[in-house]
């Protein structure tokens, strides 16, 4: 009788799961720059080295330069009394941390902990209260220890401490140490918005402590980052390359802060002014009639200052009046606006190939306001923690576009990863006497499902006829489940009628007429702010179809 080796063949289920994990990592990592991978291994060692080799602060430090005091302060969650008592609210979740503050905030998400260390709430306090709280932080957070010393919260804390105009000698010493640490731990391996926030902090602190110790070097280091990064991070159409209206607003705020503190004669003024003007034009273009941002990719309300405040800041700093544009071809966004209609369509790549952290599977999705009110919405963002809600809001089913066989257009996974991805092609945008016409093709499903699958979407806005027509052609072979979704704002009530759905929001009415395909209703989530979600009605057009086939509907207003 043969002896057993004691080794069992792996089960088919385990083998399939391992293969899926390997495939995800392969398709994620192959798009990254080598330093993005290597830098994650080096960064922890770099931070330890920076803390160990940190230079001593010069004696008798003094504020010696301007702080961006004209910029918008922004904390939508806290008030002075609560902060004084150690009660903090971030991302719409409150916690009692006591006084002295428990800066570890154990049990809270990493983003919540980061936000605690940003000090966005500092402006709520009196001068004496600011000094007291900052001293608490300095005493409880030794150099390089804890999440508060991660370069990103360090950057935002430096900005807010400079804005507050702190002048106490011990706090200036702490400010100096933080900037010296940041200077040695810049997030060159993270790229994107993190790197620009590092640069802003270095410039602001370098200007605030001008002429003392390393301060001038920090300023030039920050400006050097801007010189290197702006050509890539600000696209030719003015959009920030991560294609998130929220991060675009934050990066514009940073540019304006830097311009605000630099002397008028500084050579970097010319470098930064034109990108800031272009970004201001984008910001006014991607703002709904209700005054708040569109929610494409990782965008929510509350995180960035309101568009109105940022645009006023831009007018003050740039002496420039931003104007609305309609086409952003490199970013892939297109906007149509009349007195009664505002519509923004996403027809571009979901993000830079090597930086998809804030990407959503939302190709050809759109947002629509009618009569100044949101009617068709993006699902927004509920949280950054990996899990079912994070996966849901990034998925294709959470957007106003076509999904085939339940798959996402691009393969979003974990909290910030994207594996397989394809960009749309044949994008067209034409403005007409009646309105505008958008068109584009997406072939990404073919690689995973075969059958020569291809989706072509055409959106026609006719302001004379007061309608938006969405026409989807799905080419290919065989039977597939094809679904086009329309996510309605929670304040929109829906009533089904013979050929479609009647919509009502307050006194304003609209209608969705189904032109081709079966229709039904389902529920989903709308997350306009972190930690906040609303049940919403979703209209679904389609089902199991023999391809090629067509789906179409018309929104009348």
Image (cartoon, grey):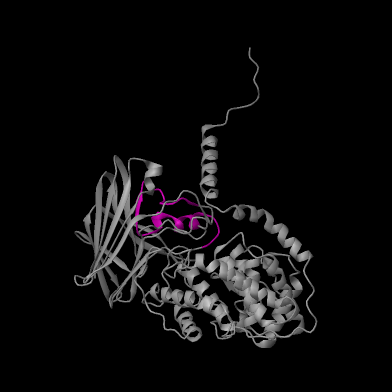
Q: Position of residue 42 (x, y in %)?
A: 68, 55
| Residue at the (32%, 48%) spot, across then down | 454
353 in relation to 307, above or below: above
- Residue 76 in sight in this render: no
| Residue at the (45%, 62%) spot, across then down | 297
Q: Quadrant of the N terminus?
A: top right
58 in relation to 388, above or below: below
Q: Position of 345 compared to 548: left or right?
A: right
Q: Position of 3 compared to 322: left or right?
A: right
Question: From which residue to which does the magenta span run?
Answer: 383-412
Residue that sits furthest to the top in the current view: 1
Q: Position of residue 255 (x, y in %)?
A: 54, 76
Q: Quadrant of the C terminus?
A: bottom left
Q: Position of 343 compared to 432: left or right?
A: right
Q: Position of 218 compared to 294: left or right?
A: right
Q: Position of residue 410 (x, y in %)?
A: 43, 52
Within the magenta stretch, is there residue 390?
yes
Tag count in the figure?
Answer: 0
Within the magenta stretch, is there residue 184?
no
Q: Position of residue 497 (x, y in %)?
A: 21, 61
| Residue at the (53%, 57%) spot, across then down | 416
- Residue 428 in sight in this render: yes
In the foreground, 117 or 362:
362
441 in relation to 226, above or below: above
């Amino acid at each position: 009788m043969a002896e057993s080796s004691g080794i069992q063949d792996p089960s088919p289920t385990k083998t399939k799961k391992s293969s899926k994990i390997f495939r995800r990592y392969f398709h994620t990592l192959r798009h990254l720059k080598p330093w993005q991978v290597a830098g994650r291994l080096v960064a922890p060692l770099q931070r330890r080295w920076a803390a160990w080799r940190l230079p001593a602060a010069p004696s008798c430090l003094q504020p010696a330069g301007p702080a961006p005091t004209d910029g918008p302060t922004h904390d939508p969650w806290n008030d002075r009394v609560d902060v004084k008592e150690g009660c903090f609210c971030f991302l719409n979740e409150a916690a009692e941390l006591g006084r002295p503050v428990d800066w570890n905030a154990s049990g809270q998400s990493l983003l919540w902990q980061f936000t605690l260390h940003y000090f966005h709430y500092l402006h709520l306090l009196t001068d004496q209260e600011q000094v007291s709280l900052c001293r608490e932080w300095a005493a409880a957070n030794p150099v390089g220890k804890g999440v508060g010393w991660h370069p990103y919260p360090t950057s935002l804390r430096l900005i807010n401490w400079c804005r507050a105009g702190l002048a106490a000698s011990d706090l200036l010493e702490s400010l100096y140490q933080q900037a010296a640490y940041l200077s040695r731990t810049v997030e060159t391996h993270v790229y994107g918005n993190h790197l620009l926030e590092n640069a802003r902090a270095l410039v602001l602190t370098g200007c605030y402590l001008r002429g003392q110790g390393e301060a001038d070097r920090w300023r030039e280091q920050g400006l050097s980052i801007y010189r290197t990064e702006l050509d890539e991070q600000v696209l030719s159409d003015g959009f920030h390359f991560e294609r998130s209206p929220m991060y675009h607003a934050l990066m514009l705020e940073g540019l304006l802060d830097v311009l605000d503190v630099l002397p008028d004669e500084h050579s970097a003024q010319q470098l930064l002014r034109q990108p800031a003007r272009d970004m201001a034009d984008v910001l006014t273009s991607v703002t709904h009639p209700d005054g708040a941002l569109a929610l494409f990719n990782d965008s929510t309300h509350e995180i960035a200052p309101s568009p109105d405040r940022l645009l006023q800041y831009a007018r003050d700093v740039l002496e420039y009046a931003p104007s609305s544009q309609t086409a952003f071809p490199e970013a892939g966004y297109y906007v149509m606006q009349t007195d009664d209609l505002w519509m923004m369509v996403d027809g571009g790549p979901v993000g830079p190939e090597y930086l998809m952290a804030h990407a959503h599977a939302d190709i050809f999705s759109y947002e629509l306001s009618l009569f100044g009110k949101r009617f068709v919405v993006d699902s927004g963002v509920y949280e950054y923690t990996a899990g079912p809600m994070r996966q849901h809001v990034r998925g294709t089913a959470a957007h106003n576009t076509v999904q085939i066989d339940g798959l996402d257009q691009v393969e979003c996974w974990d909290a910030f990863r994207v594996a397989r991805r394809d960009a749309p092609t044949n994008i067209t945008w034409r403005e007409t006497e009646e309105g505008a016409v958008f068109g584009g093709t997406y072939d990404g499903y073919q690689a995973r499902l075969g059958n020569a699958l291809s989706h072509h979407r055409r959106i026609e806005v006719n302001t004379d006829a007061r309608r938006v027509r969405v026409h989807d052609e799905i080419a290919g072979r065989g039977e597939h489940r094809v679904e086009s979704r329309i996510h309605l704002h929670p304040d929109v009530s829906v009533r089904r009628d013979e050929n479609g759905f009647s919509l009502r929001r307050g006194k304003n009415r609209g209608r969705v007429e189904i032109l081709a395909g079966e229709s039904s209703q389902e529920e989903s989530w709308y997350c306009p702010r972190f930690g906040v979600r609303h049940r919403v009605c979703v209209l679904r057009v389609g089902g199991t179809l023999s391809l090629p086939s067509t789906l179409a509907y018309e929104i009348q207003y």
